[in-house]
Amino acid sequence: MEQDKKQMPAGFLWGAATSAYQAEGAAEEDGKKRSQMDVLSAGTGFADASVASDHYHRYKEDIVLMKECGFTAYRFSFSWSRIFPDGTGEVNAKGIEFYDDLINRLVANGIKPLPTIYHYDMPMALVEKYDGWISRQSIEDFVSYSEFLIRRYGDRIKDWLIINEQSIIVEFWKKKNYIPEKYRNDPQIKFQINHHMNIAQARVSRLIHQLVPDGRSGAAIGYAPIYGLDSAPENMLAMLNAEDLKNHYFLDIYFHGTYPVGASHYLQEKGMAPVIEKDDMEIIRSGKLDFLGVNYYASKCVRFPDAAHNVRTEAESNLSGKKGEMGAYETMPDFYQYIKNPNADTNDWDWTIDPMGMEYLLRDIYQRYHIPIMITENGLGARDVLVDGRVHDDYRIDYWKKHLRAIHRAIQMGVEVQGFLPWSFIDVLSTSNGYQKRYGLVYVNRDDGDLKDLARIKKDSFYWYQRVIETNGASLFDDI
Ligand code: BG6
């Protein structure tokens, strides 16, 4: 009896995740044209997306590894500009051939394909044509692109993640969107982009409901539970403010069809609120989502901004990978100021390591929205080292073990968690740190300056995860 209790529920999905521009490479091959991420990842001093992990050419070999590990699901994303090189119009037959074969092979191997329709990679053609998501026309073009996918794959794919990490698209708006110079000093733009995405996502959610029998719509949100520095009333208020603007601002839209009042009023006061047209909120309400993908890496900590820091400051990543060199923490004046949590450890890029945060967020989200949840990303970025053909990533095993135990605890507490798809399956191009920061179960033999042979090498975490999957989670408790 006890043994059963220490497992994940029957049917729990086990797998891992990647995204198109970070894994596929072949950025301008077989008819694909550039996306904004192909452009933004170039000239950063790190690797760019042109080859990435060469998944486009090695996906068959990669699926064999998924199968060997025991995956029952795989999260990947479609590249919009591989399917529609110009964002609209002509479909690229070669692009479709790739996704047809990827999906069919996954299904043939008993691995559920869990796609994301949009993972940061707006076609560059649409950026050039009308500034991408900044224009309302993006809604129409995104809906057409999505409809094509839903009609083509709706017989094999029931669960759809529509947009990846809107919260991060807003927070890092100049890194996750190609923003033309004239808009770069206007932070209202990031909330306008977000509003357009909300309308687009709701319309696509409706299409899934109309076109896919038993289809479910979801989104993968980048989610960090936010803690107040201490019990000082102003810091507790800062915590509420940040929860409202960083978390509820997205999830209230997805599951209630409304923007939270506190955050909305704050944005109005500061001149940053999105322009909302007459029928927008009705469209949003009519396309609520069915489930949530949670991407969780780290919790955050806030205090109320003191006088010296009460100016709008945007978040900047740690580019050096040396602890303590975080570029900048976000401040929203009179609302909150992000700070380093003095009570939690971090990785080398200053991301907090907080497994308890996993139980906290799962219980909090479930209590608020009562929707099924999948963990669609979770992982530890590290400088893995290849020694004699092995990668001993015991630090990653420790990280995942603790996070999975927290998920198990949340399930015991009544939360409906349906799967675990950590970041990442193979090593992929990090969004900020090239191949210096790796997350994979499988090492990809390349670095930023040298493509080497791009060979796949199973890390220690691969073998550990294989056993976790085989025992449906029971092995997580072997040593306690
Ligand atoms: C998530 C993204 O924000 O975090 C992924 O969905 C990303 O695309 C991952 O790679 C890790 O972030 P980073 O910057 O370390 O690559």
Image (spheres, grey):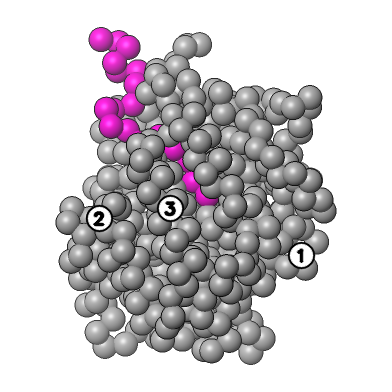
Lower sequence index among marks 3 and 2? 3
Q: Which residue is mark 1?
A: 44
Q: How far across and how far down the image is residue 53, in percent?
A: 64, 50
Q: Is residue 451 left or right of residue 299?
A: right
Q: CA distance from mark 3 to mark 2?
A: 15 Å
Task: For the N terminus, give its image quadrant.
Answer: top left
Stretch of the chain drawn in magenta: 1-18
Local packing at callout 1 (Cα closer than 10 Å; few below 14, some 14-19, many 20+) is few
> Judging from the image, what secondary structure is the residue with disc 3 in?
helix
The crowding category of the residue bearing disc 3, from other C-alpha atoms within 10 Å (few below 14, some 14 to 19, many at least 20), is few
Q: Which residue is mark 2?
A: 155
Can the viewer see residue 41? yes
Q: Residue at x 59, y 47 (%)?
A: 58
Residue beneath label 3, please? 101
The answer to which of marks 1 and 2 sits earlier in the sequence is: 1
Q: Nearer the viewer, residue 123 or 339?
A: 123
The amino acid beneath tag 2 is Asp
Q: With respect to residue 393, does 317 lie above or below?
A: below
Q: Is 233 covered by the magenta stretch?
A: no
Q: Is residue 33 left or right of residue 216?
A: right
Marks 1/3: CA–CA distance: 33 Å
Viewer-nearest of labels 3 and 2? 3
